[in-house]
Image: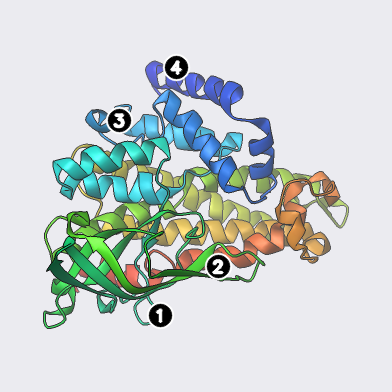
């Protein structure tokens, strides 16, 4: 089932398609469709193309550089990008920090940091999780002590963050730090912006199951951070953290990427044979495809409702948790079905197949050489951004009142 658009929305859809055809580099699109990893330069190139058109931060208010799109326009853009092989926008600056600064940052912070996010001058990463504070984020122990001396007013930060995605590329990190160790857990946390090149910052890569090092540990030893880099009020960071997480969880659902992945699954299932017939005619496999198709249609509607509420000034609440759960389950199921459809071709795991320049894949399908790597890597979807178990607790509390 396809959504019905008004003539104006359909015209916008055609405009997006024309833009992608003309401006999305085929080299990058082919890598995305093949499931291969993009370099930092590739991602920066795509961000710059979108920013030049004014489409990078499409959920920001026009006053801060957003295009002023409607909910449906944003949905159309995300879907068409995914179908065309457009890379996922690196979320940390644009989709996470940007909304926090717009809502809670002071005028000076907005004027300084927001343009640098759009221009790509700053590449941000997220300093939330710690070895003892993952889903239980209120247990963060990284400390920030405010000090005033001859060099000015600043914080001294000590501690450790983990699972810092793309931290190896970042020059800035937004962090949750504990500024009051005597207060109740959620009440003693602040939101701090830190320069990754500061003395005392030590980044160490973590190699994941697919052979990559996209996540890192970050250690802070007496790191000096200007007090002006505090966002909002001291000890009120938990409020800002929750606000940011609703945007992160909504983005993790990845509706556009689910749509693109399901379309690819259908192509593969129609091509691969089982007992002389296309796999999509196998009753058990077809039933699983139908189930995920139905779930995705339901998620489309929920996603539109959530971003519509945000566009009208609301804040995604438990709905973002619902999207996070269903979105991650759907993406994992699609990846599982692609791996199953590939059969023995998905068994070999070759790390080099995840990068540009790899030889022609079997079956003529790029996913054949990356199916296993994607399946294993994306088991993390139901864990990061707050595990799905935590999201169920949020739903039961906020919606059911349990």
Give me the residue at 74% from left, 62% from top. 351
Number of marks in the rendered image: 4
Question: From the image, which quarter does the C terminus lie in?
Answer: bottom left
Give me the residue at 60% from left, 71% from top. 207
The answer to whether residue 371 of the structure is visible from this angle is yes
Q: Nearer the viewer, mark 2 or mark 1?
A: 1
In the rendered image, which residue does mark 1 sit on?
131
| Location of residue 149 with respect to 133 vertically, above or below | above
Expressed as whole percent of the image width and height from the top left, the position of residue 123 reads 43, 48
Answer few, some or many: residues within 10 Å of disc 1's Cα (few below 14, many 20 plus, some between 14 and 19). few
Q: How is the image coloured?
A: rainbow
Q: Which mark is residue 65?
A: 3
Q: Secondary structure at mark 1?
A: loop
Q: Which mark is residue 59?
A: none
Q: CA distance from mark 3 to mark 1?
A: 37 Å
Expressed as whole percent of the image width and height from the top left, the position of residue 302 reads 35, 47
**Along the line of sight, which residue is nearer the eye, 360 or 253?**
360
Expressed as whole percent of the image width and height from the top left, the position of residue 354 reads 70, 55
The answer to whether residue 398 of the structure is visible from this angle is no
């Amino acid at each position: 089932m396809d959504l019905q658009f008004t003539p104006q929305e359909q015209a916008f859809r055609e405009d997006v398609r024309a833009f992608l055809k003309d401006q999305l580099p085929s080299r990058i699109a082919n890598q995305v469709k093949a499931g291969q990893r993009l370099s930092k330069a590739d991602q920066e190139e795509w961000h710059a193309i979108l920013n030049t058109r004014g489409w990078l931060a499409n959920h920001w208010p026009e006053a801060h550089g957003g295009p002023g799109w409607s909910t449906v326009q944003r949905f159309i853009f995300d879907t068409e990008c995914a179908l065309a092989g457009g890379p996922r926008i690196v979320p940390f600056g644009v989709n996470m920090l940007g909304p926090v600064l717009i809502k809670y940052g002071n005028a000076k912070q907005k004027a300084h940091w927001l343009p640098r996010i759009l221009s790509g001058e700053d590449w941000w990463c997220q300093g939330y999780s710690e070895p003892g504070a993952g889903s239980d984020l209120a247990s963060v122990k990284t400390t920030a002590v405010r000090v005033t001396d001859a060099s000015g007013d600043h914080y001294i930060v000590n501690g450790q963050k983990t699972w810092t995605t793309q931290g190896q590329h970042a020059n800035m990190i937004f962090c949750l730090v504990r500024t009051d160790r005597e207060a109740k857990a959620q009440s003693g946390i602040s939101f701090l912006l830190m320069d990754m090149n500061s003395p005392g910052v030590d980044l160490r890569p973590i190699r994941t199951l697919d052979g990559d090092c996209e996540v890192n540990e970050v250690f802070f030893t007496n790191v000096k951070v200007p007090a002006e880099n505090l966002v909002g009020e001291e000890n009120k960071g938990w409020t800002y953290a929750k606000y940011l997480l609703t945007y992160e969880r909504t983005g993790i659902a990845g509706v556009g990427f689910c749509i693109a992945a399901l379309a690819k699954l259908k192509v593969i299932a129609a091509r691969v044979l089982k007992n002389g017939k296309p796999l999509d005619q196998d009753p058990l496999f077809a039933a699983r495809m139908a189930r995920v198709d139905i779930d995705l249609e339901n998620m489309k509607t929920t996603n539109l409702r959530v971003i519509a509420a945000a566009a009208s000034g609301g804040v995604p609440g438990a709905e973002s948790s619902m999207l996070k759960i269903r979105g991650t389950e759907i993406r994992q199921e699609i990846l599982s079905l692609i791996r199953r459809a590939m059969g023995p071709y998905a068994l070999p795991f070759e790390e080099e197949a995840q990068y540009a320049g790899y030889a022609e894949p079997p079956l003529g399908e790029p996913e054949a050489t990356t199916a296993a790597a994607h399946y294993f890597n994306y088991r993390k979807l139901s864990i990061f951004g707050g595990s799905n178990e935590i999201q169920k607790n949020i739903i039961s509390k906020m919606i059911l009142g349990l």
